[in-house]
């Protein structure tokens, strides 16, 4: 099923390059020999992130070397990604270099365009974004040259958007570079919360590289730098701080540190005391539902389905943006799968796919879950067959 290019084929090659048997790798990584065997034979299309991280660490390779490239957006993906890459790495970002000779857009127009692009992101319209982001970055840089600090927010958020998009396209190293550009752009303005937000995005991108300790430490350090007064600080301040705490929570959960996970969840809940519902400031979501969403994710990562599903009961759909809720549904489906509620898991996956089929195809957890349901099913339902075709899982 891997056709020589899937995770199983890469794992087999990396293991043999390291001169390890399946048994030796299993012992070094702290995973089962059965898991390694199923991956290498193609009986499983993927595995949980925590297991892949353990295998990558034992093999002394980056997670991306094991996980490889994600499914394509469409036949024009390579050119689209190259356009995003070339714009992120354009020489105009170097000090003293200007690569734009067109008129800068009006700031109000640029801000409106940036916000519209973010709405596309939250709606899971990834193909559209690959065509929008290069031009958006070019306009934001022109505005930065023309207006200086007044354009700092738009430029930073344009780079931030590029970083988030690149993570979904499986280009984690390039995403980190874009996030670094976002941090640098934010420093041209005088908004400390903007700076903190871009640092949170950098930590999130590093998390996706599998550098969990670095991601957690950085998110926590920046959270301490902007620590709010829970009773008097403006709510956007609490939102940005809370987003950093939730990033640290995700990294602690992926590293399987249960005690720290409980501490992070408690701390994150403390910050929502003045919230009537979730807020979305600086393209960061925080509030009671978001905390429960991330708690569900953490307990799912830790293979504690009862606690994950308990946390999920506190999530209100109206509080979350589209793909944020979709990602939560993947966690719910995972928890139901761990609890062997296979029919419910299939229904939840179908709901996640309905939010954005395009986004769904790019989610590694979706592919792993569909593959697991296919293996557990004696007879595929029409719905599960459709999901399997969508994420390229074969019986």
Image: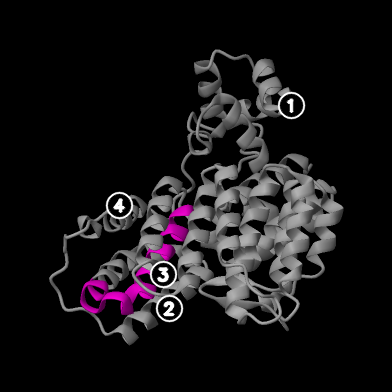
Q: Is residue 127 magenta?
A: no
Q: Which residue is mark 3?
A: 157
Give the mark, 1 or 2, whose residue is nearer the N terminus. Answer: 1
Q: Residue 32 got which mark?
A: 1
Q: Are marks 3 and 4 in contact (CB under 8 Å)?
A: no
> In percent of the image, x 42 and y 57: which residue is there?
179
Does residue 137 lie above or below 220 as drawn?
Answer: below
Assign the N terminus to one quadrant of the image.
top right
Q: Name the residue carrying label 4.
A: 82
Q: CA distance from mark 2 to mark 4?
A: 22 Å
The Cα atoms of the two marked residues, 3 and 1, are separated by 42 Å
Give me the C-alpha separation between circle 2 and circle 3: 12 Å
| In front: label 3 or label 4 | 3
**Residue 128 x, y percent position in the rendering:** 40, 67
* Residue that carries the numbered disc 2 in the rendered image: 116
Cα distance between the residues tagged 1 and 2: 46 Å
């Amino acid at each position: 099923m891997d056709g020589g290019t899937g995770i199983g084929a890469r794992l087999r090659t990396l293991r043999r390059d390291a001169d390890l048997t399946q048994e030796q790798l299993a012992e070094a990584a702290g995973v089962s020999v059965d898991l390694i065997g199923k991956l290498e034979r193609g009986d499983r299309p993927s595995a949980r992130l925590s297991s892949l991280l353990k295998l990558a660490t034992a093999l002394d390779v980056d997670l991306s070397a094991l996980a490889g490239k994600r499914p394509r957006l469409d036949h024009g993906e390579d050119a689209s990604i190259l356009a995003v890459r070339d714009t992120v790495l354009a020489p105009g970002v170097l000090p003293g270099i200007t690569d734009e000779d067109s008129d800068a857009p009006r700031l109000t127009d640029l801000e409106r365009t940036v916000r519209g692009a973010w709405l596309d992101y939250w709606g899971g319209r990834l193909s559209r974004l690959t065509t929008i982001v290069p031009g958006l970055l070019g306009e934001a840089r022109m505005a930065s040259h023309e207006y200086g600090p007044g354009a700092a927010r738009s430029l930073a958020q344009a780079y931030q958007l590029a970083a988030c998009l690149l993570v979904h396209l499986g280009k984690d190293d390039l995403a980190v570079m874009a996030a670094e550009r976002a941090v640098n752009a934010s420093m041209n303005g005088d908004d400390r919360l903007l700076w903190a937000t871009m640092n949170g995005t950098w930590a999130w991108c590093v998390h996706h590289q599998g550098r969990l300790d670095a991601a957690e430490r950085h998110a926590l350090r920046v959270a301490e730098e902007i620590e709010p007064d829970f009773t008097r600080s403006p709510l956007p301040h609490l939102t940005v701080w809370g987003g950093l705490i939730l990033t640290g929570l995700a990294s602690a959960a992926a590293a399987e540190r249960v005690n720290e996970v409980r501490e992070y969840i408690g701390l994150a809940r403390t910050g929502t005391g003045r919230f009537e519902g979730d807020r979305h400031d600086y393209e960061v979501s925080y509030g009671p539902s978001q905390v429960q969403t991330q708690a569900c994710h953490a307990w799912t990562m830790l293979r504690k389905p009862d606690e994950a599903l308990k946390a999920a009961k506190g999530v209100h759909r109206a509080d979350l943006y589209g793909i944020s809720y979709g990602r939560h549904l993947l966690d719910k489906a995972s928890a139901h799968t761990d609890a062997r509620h296979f029919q419910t898991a299939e229904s939840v996956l179908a709901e996640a796919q309905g939010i954005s089929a395009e986004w769904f195809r790019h989610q590694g957890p979706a592919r792993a879950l569909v593959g697991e349901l296919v293996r557990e099913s004696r007879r595929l339902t029409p719905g599960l067959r459709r999901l399997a075709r969508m994420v390229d899982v074969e019986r």
